[in-house]
Image: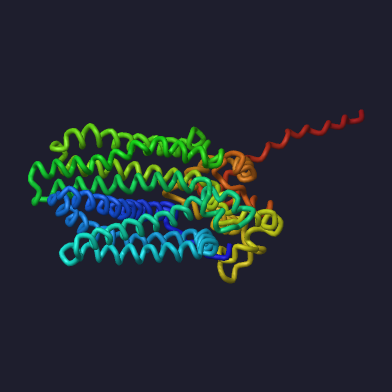
Amino acid sequence: MQFPHFFVPRAGGGLLIAAVAIFHIMIAHFAVGTGLFNAVSETVARRRGDTALREFLRTHTRFLILLSFVAGAVSGVGIWLTTAIVSPSAISTLIHQFMWGWATEWVFFIVEIAAGYVYYYGWDRLDPRTHEIVGWIYAASAWLSLFVINGILTFMLTPGAWLSEHDFWLGFFNPTMLPSLLIRTVSCVSLAAIFAVIIASVDKKLDRDERGRIVRYAGLWLMSMVLMLPLSLWYFVMVPAKSRDLVFGGAVPMTMFFVFGLIASTILGLYAWFGVVRRSHDVNLPTALTMLAVSAIATGSLEFVREGIRKPFVISGYMYSNSILKTDVPELNRTGILAKARWVVPQGADPRTATPQDRGRWVFDAECAQCHTMDGFNAMRPLVKGWSRPLIDMSLSRLDEMKYFMPPFVGSDAERRDLGVYLDMLDGVENVPPRPESPPQKEPPQRRRQP
């Protein structure tokens, strides 16, 4: 609670992170996959004396430099910026717990960038053997960069024994680290193959037979997408049971996006054989771009699932999605959340003398605004529209019981009632139940006159 919250009107912070992250992941996976694709392909081309494939790799590397080293670098900074301002507590935890991991990744990244430039500018300047070695240096450093980042990202879902030991290696080599690494490696080489097909489709230096041969060769790499199904099943065996339940029926959006991702991946893998390898001459630019779109759907869907199944946590078992530490809940329930959320109360305001609506809005900003907007993505106003005050109070007191992916309400009973008042006022009219009618008063008996 020591950081101020960053509010993104209508879109919300989560959607902002998702938009930047998916764009960056596509480029980053392409960069890693292209390193492996180029290193292996140049080795094959030199052994076979395949001049057309080697010249194609020169063009492929130019596209790598233009896309990954420019757009990838900018979007990579964007990832750090958006995550740091939307969820600073989580980023602070990752930096402090994995400082040497990040430092190691940065070394790999610097080597990757340097080797990439040497590889591109060394086509005609280095002897064939040296150039081939530089290509393998780029491939190894790029994949090792992925290796480190993957270990830290999977820690957020399955910290495992780290929760009790807080040991670097226990957190890094967590239960989902290996299956996730293999899934990402398959995604990397598949994206490299798709872009190879796109580039071959527009490369005018290739004749029809050369283009068909290179497309068919790239299709062999793309066939690795069929591994997504067994690898994803292995991955979900290793995630916590409640997270797995969200995918398999517990949350409809999670189930839908998981199915989208697997279907798109399987379609690409099957098409790689039947449409690319066996009928390479029929693959044109529109077809290749369609393959890229399907790949984006697969990548975006599975990334959405990976992020979503962490709920109600941002670091499972440790920090809730609203940045409240699980261990701090008892104290915050005793003292109240506004006493700790120093940034949500305006300067000069006193919660003790504020109206219930104002206190409720501050509690909303402290606990709910990281995931919910008022009007827009994941909006609160339509969610509670028509709810009565008793229903709101009951829902707030049992948030985590009604919906597993929601964190529990944290704070005092008075703050929970204030939040209920604020949510009840979102329609503009307070939904106060009508007062019960008073029972009819009996007329007093008339006194009889004495004769």
Position in image of residue 194 (x %, y %): 24, 45
Residue name at image x 68 percent, y 37 percent: 436
Position in image of residue 15 (x %, y %): 41, 52
The part of the image, by quadrant, that contains residue 13 is bottom left
Left or right relative to 262: residue 168:
right
Residue name at image x 37 percent, y 36 percent: 262
Which one is in front, 87 or 374?
A: 87
Residue name at image x 30 percent, y 36 percent: 269
Specify whether residue 440 is in view.
Answer: yes
Which one is in front, 169 or 252?
A: 169
Position in image of residue 84 (x %, y %): 46, 62
Which one is in front, 118 or 149?
A: 118
Position in image of residue 376 (x %, y %): 42, 49
Which one is in front, 412 or 183?
A: 183
Residue 256 in the image: above or below residue 20: above
In which quadrant of the rendered image does the N terminus lie?
bottom right
Residue at the right extreme?
451
Left or right relative to 234: residue 396:
right
Left or right relative to 50: residue 9:
right
